[in-house]
Image: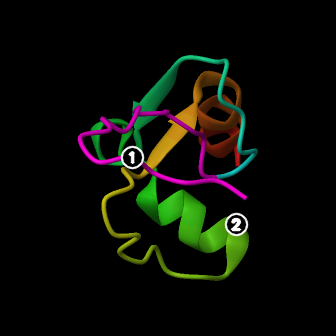
């Protein structure tokens, strides 16, 4: 059982939206203009994920560009 203490500061983890990798460098999909490729590949529109940024790792970004 985990408990969040008063005054705790959350850590920010950058994660790829496609492969969920956290150790690679990630970039915003909007900066690379990959939103349309993502929607065509997955068949799903990008949706607002709250506070999470729409990021992809360099490997997934290259795969989306090639798609």
Q: Is label 2 in a helix, a strand or a loop?
A: helix
The kind of secondary structure element at disc 1 is loop
Residue toward you, 48 or 5: 5
Query: Picture coordinates of residue 13 (x, y %)?
Result: 49, 33
Per the model, the C-alpha gap separating discs 2 and 1 is: 41 Å
Q: In front: 60, or 53? A: 53
Asked if the residue under mark 1 is in contact with the one under mark 2, i.e. CB atoms within 8 Å, the reply is no
**Looking at the picture, how far across and down is residue 56, in whole percent?**
55, 39
Is residue 13 or residue 66 the one in the foreground?
13
User: What x and y, as percent, mark residue 16?
Assistant: 60, 41
* Residue 30's disc number: none
Residue sitting at x 69%, y 38%: 66
What residue is shown at x 30% (from left), y 35% (from top)? 9
Which residue is the site of mark 1?
5
Q: Nearer the viewer, residue 27 or 11?
A: 11
- Where in the figure is residue 54, as x and y percent of width and height? 41, 52
Task: Please state, as top left, top right, bottom left or bottom right, where the N terminus lies in the image.
Answer: bottom right
Q: In the drawing, does residue 46 fall left or right of residue 61?
A: left
* Classed neighbour count for the residue bearing mark 2: other residues with Cα under 10 Å, few (<14), some (14–19), many (≥20): few
User: Farthest residue toward the left?
Assistant: 7
Q: Is residue 61 above or below residue 5?
A: above
Image point 62% across, 72% down: which residue?
Answer: 40
The magenta stretch is 1-17
Q: Which mark is residue 41?
A: 2
Q: Main secondary structure of the magenta part?
A: loop
């Amino acid at each position: 059982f985990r408990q969040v203490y008063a005054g705790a500061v959350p850590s920010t983890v950058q994660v790829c939206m496609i492969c969920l990798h956290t150790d690679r460098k990630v970039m915003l999909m909007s900066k690379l203009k990959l939103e349309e490729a993502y929607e065509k590949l997955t068949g799903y529109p990008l949706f607002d994920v709250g506070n999470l940024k729409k990021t992809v790792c360099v490997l997934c970004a290259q795969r989306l560009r090639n798609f």
